[in-house]
Amino acid sequence: MATVTEPAQSRLLNRELSWVEFNARVLELAEDERLPLLERLRFAAIFAQNLDEFFMVRVAGLLELDESDVAVRSVDGLAPGQALAAIHERVGELTARQGRLWKRELRPALAKAGIEVATLEQCTDREREKLARYFEREVYPILTPLAVGPGQPFPYVSGLSLSLGVIASDPDTGEERFARVKVPEVLDRFVAIGKRFVPLESVISHFLPMLFPGMEIAERALFRVTRDADFELSDDADDLLEAVESELRRRRFGDVVRLEVSASASSDMRERLIEGLGVRPGQVYEIEGLLDQSELWQLVSLDRPDLKHEPWIPVVPPRWARVTSATDVFEEIRRGDLLVQQPYDSFRSSFEALAQAAARDPDVIAIKTTVYRTSNESSLIGSLIECAEDGKQSVCLVELKARFDERRNIEWSRAMEEAGVHVVHGFPDVKIHAKMTLVVRREAGGLRRYVHVGTGNYNASTARLYEDVGLFTADEEISADVADLFNHVTGFGRPQRFRKLLVAPFAMRARLVDEIRRVSAAVAEGRPARIRLKLNALVDPTIIEELYAASAAGVPIEVMARSICMLRPGVKGLSETIRVTSIVGRFLEHSRIYSFEVDDEASVYMGSADLMPRNLDRRIEVLAPVENARARAEVGAILDSAFSDTTNTWELGPDGDWRRLERKGKKPHSHQEAMMRRARGRARRTRS
């Protein structure tokens, strides 16, 4: 076991490098030969997609800091330049691994399965004829070569677009020109010719002479740029929607933060790109094999069930199976709190059933909800509009600053406003990240409030892919807290102390610290106690130091951090009672559950907040207590299963390295498969 003898900053791991290691775990799943082939391809696409967002936001921020004159270090002690160098080295290693994986394993395996990704040169004469006709009819008309020369500056290259860098030579004069040809994003990346799939860039590359008549093509190389996509709003922005729209227009012209270029490119080609795009050598990544594997989704979506997991169909939770009318929804919640877990339990039959009941039940007089990310498939927006058209009070807090969903949320806002829904956009400097819904209903004894608090977005698409939990309750104090919080966001005033909810950016951190210290005090008294945390990211230095103190007091602590963890576990004298694991698997582990257990009692909270400064200080977040005995037992069962997983679990060592648990000895336990079996079993018992 490591011993803490290093400087204070070594108590924490670097945030950005911790995220890079999360993405390395995603890549390991793409490398896992035990998975169906197209599932491996899916993880390869996710790995690439994740990296894009990481560079657009996190690396962009580091570059900005590095270029400023302000001497600043992250809490783990790294200067921006040091972090950028470490990121470049590690990401370079991972992308090289991904390139080898594609070339040596995935592409040959696809070909063996009848899905051949081929170059045009590998096609038959007849197939090339078909590709020539396709190029002439569908591709050539929309191509625009942009050459660099006198009066022709280096062209603007849009973020995440794939391009061919071309060096064309005039055989008569010997003059050479660089040109950029954009691979059209409106066309499929892979052109289907029988059972073969030819990358579009390969087709364009083959027919380049048509774009440069009379010229010789001296070189062609594929490249791709990533641009800064983050933005900040002024705290005094009068019209938040207008300010966000303005920033979205500016986003496409953000600085280049990464240049990916084919490893086959000559040094001359690389230098032309570096100079033209204005990037440093440390921002350049040479890519072996297929560039931009985020486009592999096209192949993942092929109708080949033999190469995928058996589809999972969410089940109707037992108590929701009793619901046959809108009034039944509210009667069931009155009977006792309900806890659901997506994607095992049906989102449509639980949360969307509540929203639809609010629209259809004539006794409902108001609905208030939050939208951070939703989808066209989700019925929530329709239910809000239906309520408004029925004369019910319908309120929606739409977070316009939900990264990469800003434009969609603007469109939803306008559609709802036109239908009469009261749309509120929150604050320029604080994001509304809480997932909460309040329904007010007129009943015999007066008005009664019903509440849903969740860990995930109200999004029917991600509800089939993300693991989340949701709590339905008619508890008077919780519903009063939710009502007060809605009024705070839509109105003007300083909220008073909340009765049961833990709410950021107010007292959430302080309340969590109190819980940690309560468990520590119990252990000091010799009582059995432990802390179990399941979350996406553990970053907040204050919380981490409290966990270190609890470990020093002897508290057993289990942390399941799906992506980022800055806490260094297993260090003698610092964190030797803390174990940190991460599950990365078929479904994205997204729920945030915090359990503080003393004797046979547990204080359990669930909600939207990760333990990060941004969540605790700059967002509206909610954690709700799980007080109902049955619901608390269900949460306990989820945690028991998750912390027992031996199939898709990685463990964090004191050196900062993540190691996948090996299946040795006892029968392997897959948490996600166990949750599917549990959901099916409950559904069968309900039907019988």
Image (spheres, rainbow, N blue to C red):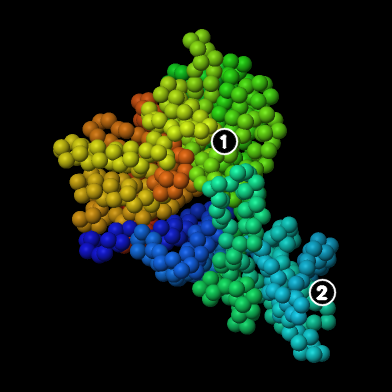
Q: Position of residue 410 (x, y in %)?
A: 65, 43
Q: Separation of disc 2 and disc 1 at Cα?
A: 53 Å
Is any part of residue 65 visible from this angle? yes
Residue at horizontal 37 percent and vertical 50 percent from the top: 540
Residue at horizontal 41 percent and vertical 24 percent from the top: 477
**421 vs 660, nearest the viewer:** 421
Quadrant containing the N terminus is: bottom left
Q: Position of residue 397 (x, y in %)?
A: 57, 35
Left or right: where does residue 545 sit relative to residue 276? Answer: left
**337 vs 155, nearest the viewer:** 155
Q: Report the label total.
A: 2
**347 vs 361, nearest the viewer:** 361
Residue under label 2, please give it: 210
Question: Where is 108 relative to 497, above or below?
Answer: below
Question: Where is 146 relative to 648, above or below?
Answer: below
Numbered disc 1: secondary structure: strand
Q: Which mark is residue 251?
A: none
Residue at horizontal 41 percent and vertical 44 percent from the top: 616
Numbered disc 2: secondary structure: helix
Q: Position of residue 388 (x, y in %)?
A: 65, 25
Q: Nearer the viewer, mark 2 or mark 1?
A: 1
Q: Position of residue 455 (x, y in %)?
A: 47, 38
Upstream in sequence: badge 2 or badge 1? 2
Q: Amino acid at mark 1?
A: Leu
Q: Are marks 2 and 1 in contact (CB under 8 Å)?
A: no
Q: Residue furthest left?
A: 525
Q: Amino acid at mark 2?
A: Met
Residue under label 1, please give it: 397
Question: Where is 593 relative to 478, above or below?
Answer: below
Residue at horizontal 27 percent and vertical 30 percent from the top: 601
